[in-house]
Every structure is written in structure tokens, then in C-alpha cells.
Amino acid sequence: MRPCRILSLIAVGLGYFFGVACGASGRIPDADRLAWRTLAEVSRPALSAGVASPRDTPLSWRRWWTSQEVYVDPDGHQPPSTATAGVARPISCQVESERERLSPFEHQPDPCEKIFLNGPSVGYVVAREFWIRDRVIVAAGAGKIRFPLPPNPMAVEMKTEWRTKSLAPAGEYVRGVDDQGNDRVLVAFHMMIHAQLDWVWATFIHENFAHLVTDNYATLNDSFGDFHGHPSNPLVQLLHDSHVDILRHYKLIGTQLGLHEPLLLGNPLIEGRKMIQQKQASCISCHRFAASDQKGHLPSGIGGVGGVPPIPGYNSLNFNFTLARRSQCIAGPPACYNQ
């Protein structure tokens, strides 16, 4: 069955029904609506079993496991055995971040990046022991890496960017507490939604920082949630019904899908402003570099824009950089190299 035929069941694993139309190419024309509905459902507080602190906003995706917890040292403890943690934990900021890697000379005030994986994504990695890089190399070589798709519960991953509350403009934010006891606010995030083979990409930014998009010669494109610069009535109703009105204070910069779309899409709080200004930011074009050769090396480059042909000598990791960068070798060099 082609992906186009099953997209009317796109939300089987999220607990709601969402019908979308398909064109001859198998694309999802209503990707903006899909992004907002997915975000509302994975944030719905009714699914949350608790938060780390009364200072945390009780959103359900905050109880997902993080990439640091799923991809563990193969010689150390095992990854989590359950699909979700069941409770939010303090935010342990990653040492590395996408923006530091792609825009190392841009100053970031107290950066804090964190990646969260939903239950189907975690279950897929754990069942195949993909925290072990040697297993990833073999599966990629056989063309067998494919995260869960509809009609099964689909994989969703979120890359989140936080700042200490004192460094953010006053306003309403999703809140969290880091492992040092500092109050943090969510300023931007990416979503990867495995609603089709090459994923659906969406990126959001808090309204207080939305000017950075247009200041850097890009645009906000949201056919579902925006009405002349304000949240649309359908979006307001969706968020209200899901008890996540706080998300009204976030703007969808845009969505991207399709292997051959030349669309630009980036987030100035995640990729960096220079990439946005120079028209170099494209989610799917960058993630095609989530690939591996037979030793575990990743291809060099940052993606550019435009089509995403296969990279000679490398096997796809289903566009998943978390898998590409966090899995670890057992054998070690020269048989297997970590990133």
C-alpha cells in the first residue's frame, strides 16, 4: 500500500483521527494542519503522569525519553525498557547543539538543546538494539532502517531549545526546570513527524522571537494557524480542546516534505541566523546527511537546499541524525567508528 493510501489514518498512534488529501505524488498538502494537530495531541496534559516541579508546564511530550537516555553506552547500562518515562524529569542540557555545530561563531546566551523521542520511536530503537552502532551499520547496509509509519503508531521526535527565564523577554512560555535548578523557558523547537517515508518537518518559534525570522530575510508560512499575524480561530479551538492554550504563544515558521522540494526552512534560534540569511537552511536537505558508510562514518557537509539524491557510498539512516550521532560502537576501530 502506498503511503498516500494510508494517510487518512495518520493519527492512529496519537489517539485522534485526521484525514488528509493525497495528490498523485503522495504528498501531504495540509502539512501545516498536521503539524499543529500532532503538536496539540502530544502536548495534551491528560496524557501526562506528572512533572518534575510545580514550575514545569505539564505537557505530555515532556515525559518522553530523551536521546541521552535512549542511546546509552553499549558497555554500560541498558536503555529504558518502557516506551515513555511516565514523568517529566529535570532538563539536562546537551553539551553539543545543532546551532553550535552549524553556526559556531554566533553567540548563544546560555544555550540548552534537548531532543525528545515518542514511544514508537523509542520502541523501534530499543527493539533493534540501535543504540549499538554496529547494528545500525548492518541494518543501513541492508536498507532496513525505517521508523514506524501509519497505520502503525508513528514516530515523532522533537528538538527543543531552552533559555533561562531571565534571558528571555517577558511573556507566556512553556516552562521547565533544568538539572541545576534554573527556570527555563521553551523558545523554539523542531518536530519530525514520520507520517510518510521521508518524514514531515515542522519548526516553531515563540512569538517574542518571531521577528528574528523576518529580520533575517525569511518568512512565516502557516496556512492553518495564522490569521493576519494572530492565531486563527481553528487553531485557537484546537488548542483549547486539547487543554494546551499556552501553545498559542508559538508560531509555526513552516513545514517541509518531499524528497525533491527545494523549499527553505530553518529556525534562527536553532540553525543560526547566518544560515537563514544566506538561504542555506533546509530541514530535509540537511537530514539526508544522516547516512553511514560500512565503518559508521557520516558524510561531510551541511545539506544545502534543493533535492536530496542518495550520497554515493553511504546508506540512509531514514533521515535520523539522533540515530546517526548517538549510537555507539562495540567493535571499535577499524571495524566501527563513532561520530
Image (tube, grey):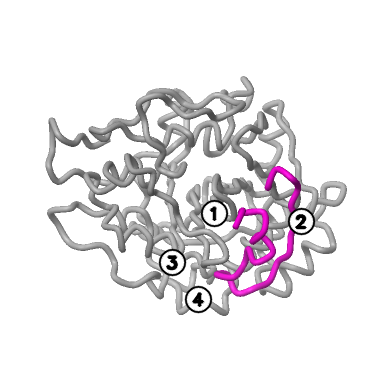
> For mark 3, does the 10 Å Cα neighbourhood hold few (<14), some (14 to 19), or many (20 or more) residues?
many
Q: Position of residue 33 (x, y in %)?
A: 73, 56
Quarter assignment of residue 235: bottom right
Q: Secondary structure at mark 4?
A: loop
Residue 2 position, x and y percent, is: 61, 53
Compare marks 2 and 3 and give the one earlier in the sequence.
2
Q: Is residue 162 visible?
A: no
Up the image or down, 25 lies above or below 89; here it is above
Q: Residue at 74% of width from left, 68% of height from top?
A: 238
* Residue on which the image places disc 3: 119
The first of marks 4 and 3 along the sequence is: 4
Residue most extreme to the top: 278
Q: Residues within 10 Å of mark 4 (few under 14, many from 20)?
A: some
Please state the extent of the stretch shown in magenta in the rendering. 1-26
**For mark 4, what is the residue?**
48
Discs 1, 2 touching: Cβ within 8 Å: no
Q: Amino acid at mark 1?
A: His
Figure quadrant of the C terminus:
top left
Instruction: In this rendered view, identify the residue nearer to me: 146 or 179.
Output: 146
When the figure is inspected, residue 60 is found, relative to residue 99, above or below; the finding is: below
Q: Inspect the image, locate mark 2, and give the three-letter code of the amino acid beneath it.
A: Ala
Neighbour class for label 2 at 10 Å: few (<14), some, many (≥20)? few
- Give me the C-alpha separation between circle 1 and circle 2: 17 Å
Q: Which residue is mark 1?
A: 194
Q: Which residue is mark 2?
A: 21
Point out residue 147 in the picture as x, y percentages from the top left corner.
Answer: 45, 54
In-front residue for pair 338/129: 129
> SS of the residue at dot 2?
loop
